[in-house]
Amino acid sequence: MLSNTANPIKQVDAGFALAAYREMLFIRAFEQQCFDLSTSTPPAIAGSIHLCAGQEAIPVGAMAALRPGTDRIVATYRGHGWALSGNLDPEQVLAEICHRKNGINGGRAGSALITAPWAGFIGENSIVGAGGPIACGVAFGARLKKSVVIVSFGEGATSQGALHESMVFASTFALPVIFICENNGWSEMTASSEIIKVDRLAKRASGYGMTGVTVDGTDPIAIRDTVAQAADHARDGHGPSFIECRVSRLWGHYNRDVEHYRPKEDRSKAVENDPLTILAKRLRQSGIADEQALEHYSIAVVREIALLAAKVAGSAAPSPADARLHVIGDIKPALRSTASLTNRRAAVETTYIGAVNEALRRILAADDRSLVYGEDVGKAGGIFGATRNLQREFGVDRVFDTPIAEAAILGSAIGAALEGFKPIVEIMWADFLLVALDQIINQAANFRYVTQGRSSVPIVIRTQQGATPGSCPQHSQSLEALLFHIPGLLLGLPSTPQDAYDMLRSAAEACDPTILIEARGLYQRRGEVIFDKNVEPIGTARLVRDGKDLAIITWGATVPEASEAAVRLAAEGIDVAILDLRWLSPLDQESLFSIASQCQWRVLVVHEANLTGGVGAEIATRIAARHSESIVHRLAAPDVRIPASPVLQAALLPRADAIVNAARLLANGAYPLGNV
């Protein structure tokens, strides 16, 4: 229930109330300084910033209930108050907002993405509602330490699917997450009352199986005590809580928002609900501080902020030479087998999916930090059997089923990785990545870059793609080009049982987010696998077949088709080389150019994904840039959706017959018809 701000402050709370007032004053003055710097001529802060005036009591009260250095914070993009209350250096925070070299992220994060996992501040998040799934993953580690994770968000975020998924996830696993909704009455520029049709958002908590309360967001004492209860509840293993803090937004949605849409009456009510004014009145009424003492605090804070701003103004801008650094970490060398040479097992025949299963088993056995989870991967062993029997061997804490919630699965993997785990998560179909790309592209791919290499998220995402008979257009897409475009991700597509095994083991040792796209159509294909051989490093292509007349560059599901075509072409006297790229990010450009040169720069690039905007176009461009007289042709699925009918699929996909026809013409110096 809402606290009564008219009540006097109890003597036992006097010291905290006075300290809270000073801290709230500091945050307000800090935000005022940010506003002034962003609207000066010329502006000292580029772009938009989102300020928390009116909401200062929430982080101040909440942080007073937490354990510094142990508990974790995931903040909204309106999170400067959380960063300051979370014990980050104010000078580094202001320098970051001003895009300076000495900013906590070296100017890479700016105002809305300040990130410092090493200090317990997992970070702000400029994507509405996206912090919830990450908080769940951080809570995997927090649960072991009897600590808690707070994730803050505005009431507008409660309309976001990712936040909904995170609350389902947190309740499912009884995670120690405290969801704090900073309800300021506005969902960006739309009155929240026009969207939210319940009088208290906390009522929704019961639908997730968690406790929900509404408190006065201007009262740091009420917030402290409520968060303390929620923290005790979580530390005792009882799971998450939802705390709705009612506040007012004193300023606009962002620094240049003139609020033309906002009624004057609403602005007036917001001023009346200023937490600083309310707390100052209570301090005076309770005899804790008089007007002179409060004025002394105000003067001291203004001076402190002015000194801070002067220091930041004199600091250096980032070096342009550093702009390309810390996209991905160093690629680790090949893994070495622990078995002696004399005891190494001979090759074992197994299926592609069997090789995946064995790789997962060995990864789990070798590293206690490894987790394997996703939809149906635990008890059932996965829809394709990739995780069969793993839960039986390693237990439900390390191999487990999740709700059908891709954003929560991927986001929780990020949070878990930040806490020292090595998560391997399965997304059942690559098509399902599309409902949660934010957690891959806006979240995972950014951590190393934004933190200048101080933090990374070594997660592995397993999925499968491609057309098989009967698969509808929502289960048959080849999506590697989308991920190939994103800096900060490692991307591989194994085509053989040996590579399915080797590449997964290599991915588990990587220090950056790695996506392995398996080929569903190859899952039951058998081949010999040496489980104890040295595993090749990430980013190496594989020469499938040597030749001199024509190079076929391919990966994934089309590798067997290219191999069949090469045998048929050899019978015609055409000597074809096949290079399986395997890893698209990083791309083995040296092997690519070497095989193209060996084949007189006559190259056929084959992939199952649609032609336009595909990886083949990038490869063709690089080869053409390297050798201006090269002849490069692309053979791919045309720019249509992939139908379920086997007859229609066969008419669209680049199978062996189409590869033979294209290669035959290209080897003779002619461009094939069709795809180019």
Image: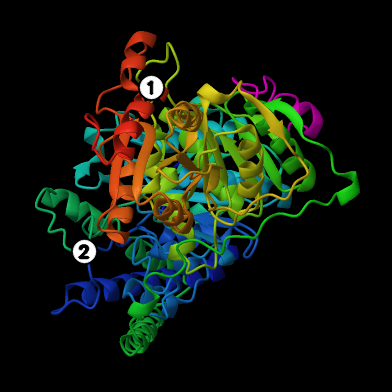
Disc 2, SS: loop
Q: Is residue 184 visible?
A: no
Badge 2: residue crowd in 10 Å (few <14, some 14–19, many ≥20): some
Quarter of the image where the C terminus is located: top left
Image quarter of residue 625: bottom left
Q: Which mark is residue 474?
A: none
Q: Position of residue 154 (x, y in %)?
A: 36, 46
Q: Which of the 4 image quadrants contains residue 665?
A: top left
Residue 210, position as x, y percentages in the image: 56, 32
Q: Is residue 17 left or right of residue 273?
A: right
Q: Residue at x 86, y 50 (%)?
A: 341
Mark earlier in primary sequence (1, 2): 2
State the residue at coordinates (23%, 78%). 44
- For this orientation, the residue located farthest to the left is 260
Q: Which residue is mark 1?
A: 657
What segment carries the magenta color? 378-398
Name the residue that disc number 2 marks.
255
Q: Return the x and y of residue 565 as percentages of the image width and height.
A: 45, 28
**Residue at the right extreme?**
342
- Is residue 301 visible in the rendered image? The answer is yes
Q: Looking at numbered disc 1 in the image, what kind of residue is underneath it?
A: Asp
Residue kind at label 2, given as amino acid type: Asn
**For residue 466, which quarter of the picture?**
top left
